[in-house]
Image (cartoon, coloured by chain):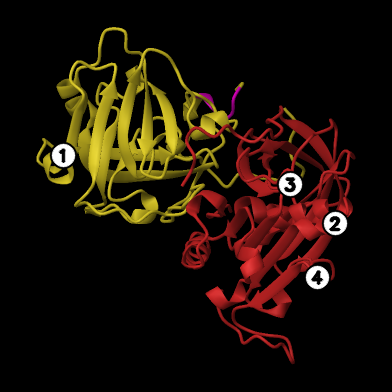
């Protein structure tokens, strides 16, 4: 390892920070590639389709009526900031998938947004209590610049996987790169393995 | 709107970590410096791409941040990064206060295959504050190839003292908007970007690149949409806190 002349660490590092990440503190940087959309909950829907027994669609009222679920923990952006100890509320993807019932051949999903943004994830990473459709942040409605009215939340992966303005997931029997994944970013995106870019 | 089926542009992909040597440091404004690095290994990149800088302490602790490349690809093994010093910025503070010519610096790049300009299509570039940096790479690229007629660059800054690349940026293809303080005799009053700042020719550009803070990017995209520019022509790079 080669050191940078004159650079010193600032004391003990928070063990919640994956390698190469820093604590952004109270800030929550906004990083998106497209214009921020205006979405009405009146016409909002969430769709689960593809390789499922029961293709399903929920309106805003319907998804809010499902048993809710809370995530408390950390989020990690590939641009090297992490935000520690945050709280989101929404519905577990398990709840939605238990209604849609993926076929035995299902292995991956592609999540889509109302903006056309897409991102791919292994099915195993969005089941077992590790993924949500989230509409509340710290007890208040999720702000539009952070993906409101609702975003995907997959906090154990880099945050570009947590698609803002999410409109649905499509279940597949193979992996199909999404927007950033076609643009050089990793297909999986585990921050603890530093899976930042294709080839990492 | 991002076209989901659109393949990414054919932009160079990220390479491995490598070392570089600082060959020049220049002050752009009181809080902004440009660092020219000679890379140990060649790096092919396009205007708009960025690199990650990694600092390593003797105890193994590392700190990394992304910075846009300000220079234009010129076939040399040198790149230039322009960095704003943030209050309490762990990396930007080190680069400004400690890094010296002949020091070694670890970098990785190029990163980003979306906010890139290939150099052959007309484009409108709108940058706020440090958001002008990747656009400057595009402008330098166009000028170096004698194609500056392809680009129109609008730079929004608070005051004349905070204008990046003050001696190089002004030209027939650039427009400077001051938001708080104007030079003596400047025809446009100080203020944020409004529809009247963008000409019909600008709004017809087939591709628009917007770079700056989240609030700047949202304000600009609103002005563009009001001017009839479809979302699909707008590419946005939002700069968050990158201390």
**Chain on which label 1 sits:** A
As drawn, the residue found furthest toward the top would be A104
3D distance between C-alphas at marks 3 and 4: 20 Å
Secondary structure under tag 4 reads loop
Q: Which chain, by letter, is yellow?
A: A
Q: Which of marks 2 and 1 is in front?
A: 2
> What shade has chain B been given?
red
Question: Marks 3 and 4: same chain?
Answer: yes
Q: Residues within 10 Å of mark 3 (few under 14, many from 20)?
A: many
The residue positioned 58% from the left and 60% from the top of the image is B212
**Label ID, residue B143:** 2
**Chain on which label 3 sits:** B
Does residue A196 show up magenta in the picture?
Answer: yes
In magenta, the rendered stretch is A193-198
Tag 3–tag 2 contact (CB < 8 Å): no
**Label ID, residue B172:** 4
Where in the figure is residue A64, as x and y percent of width and height? Answer: 14, 43
Question: Marks 2 and 4: same chain?
Answer: yes
Q: Which of A27 and B216 is in front in this view?
A: B216
**Label ID, residue A53:** none
Question: In terms of sequence position, does the residue under pointer 3 or pointer 4 come before the other?
Answer: 3
């Amino acid at each position: 390892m080669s050191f940078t002349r004159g650079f010193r660490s600032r004391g003990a590092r928070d063990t919640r920070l994956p390698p190469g990440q820093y604590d952004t503190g109270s800030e929550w940087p906004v990083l998106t590639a497209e214009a921020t959309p205006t979405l009405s909950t009146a016409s909002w829907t969430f769709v689960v389709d593809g390789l499922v027994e029961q293709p399903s669609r929920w309106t805003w009222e319907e998804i809010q009526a499902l048993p809710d679920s809370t995530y408390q923990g950390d989020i990690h952006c590939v641009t090297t900031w992490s935000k520690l100890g945050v709280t989101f509320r929404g519905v577990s993807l398990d709840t939605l998938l238990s209604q849609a019932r993926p076929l035995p051949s299902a292995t991956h999903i592609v999540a889509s947004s109302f903006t056309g943004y897409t991102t791919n994830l292994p099915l195993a990473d969005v089941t077992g209590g590790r993924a949500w459709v989230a509409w509340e942040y710290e007890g208040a409605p999720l702000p539009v610049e952070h993906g409101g009215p609702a975003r995907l939340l997959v906090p154990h992966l880099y945050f570009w996987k947590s698609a803002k303005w999410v409109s649905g997931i499509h279940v597949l029997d193979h992996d199909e790169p999404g927007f950033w994944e076609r643009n050089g970013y990793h297909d999986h995106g585990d921050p603890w393995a530093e899976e930042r870019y294709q080839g990492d | 709107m991002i076209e989901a089926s659109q393949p990414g542009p054919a932009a160079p992909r990220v390479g491995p970590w490598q070392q570089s040597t600082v060959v020049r440091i220049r002050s752009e404004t009181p809080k902004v410096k440009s660092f020219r690095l000679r890379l140990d290994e060649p790096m092919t990149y396009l205007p708009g791409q960025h690199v990650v800088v990694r600092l390593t302490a003797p105890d193994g602790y590392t700190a990394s941040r992304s910075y846009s490349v300000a220079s234009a690809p010129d076939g040399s093994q040198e790149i230039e990064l322009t960095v704003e010093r943030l209050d309490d910025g762990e990396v930007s503070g080190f680069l400004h206060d400690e890094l010296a010519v002949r020091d070694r610096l670890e970098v990785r790049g190029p990163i980003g295959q979306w906010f890139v300009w290939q150099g052959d299509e007309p484009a409108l570039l709108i940058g706020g504050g440090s958001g002008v940096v990747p656009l400057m790479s595009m402008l330098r690229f166009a000028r170096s190839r004698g194609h500056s007629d392809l680009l129109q660059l609008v730079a929004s800054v608070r005051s004349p003292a905070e204008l990046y690349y003050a001696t190089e940026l002004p030209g027939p293809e650039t427009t400077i908007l001051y938001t708080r303080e104007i030079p003596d005799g400047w025809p446009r009053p100080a203020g944020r970007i409004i529809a009247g700042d963008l000409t019909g020719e600008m709004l017809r550009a087939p591709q628009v690149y917007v770079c700056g803070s989240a609030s700047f990017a949202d304000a600009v995209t609103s002005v563009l949409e009001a001017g009839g520019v479809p979302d699909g022509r707008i590419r946005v790079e939002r700069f968050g806190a990158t201390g």
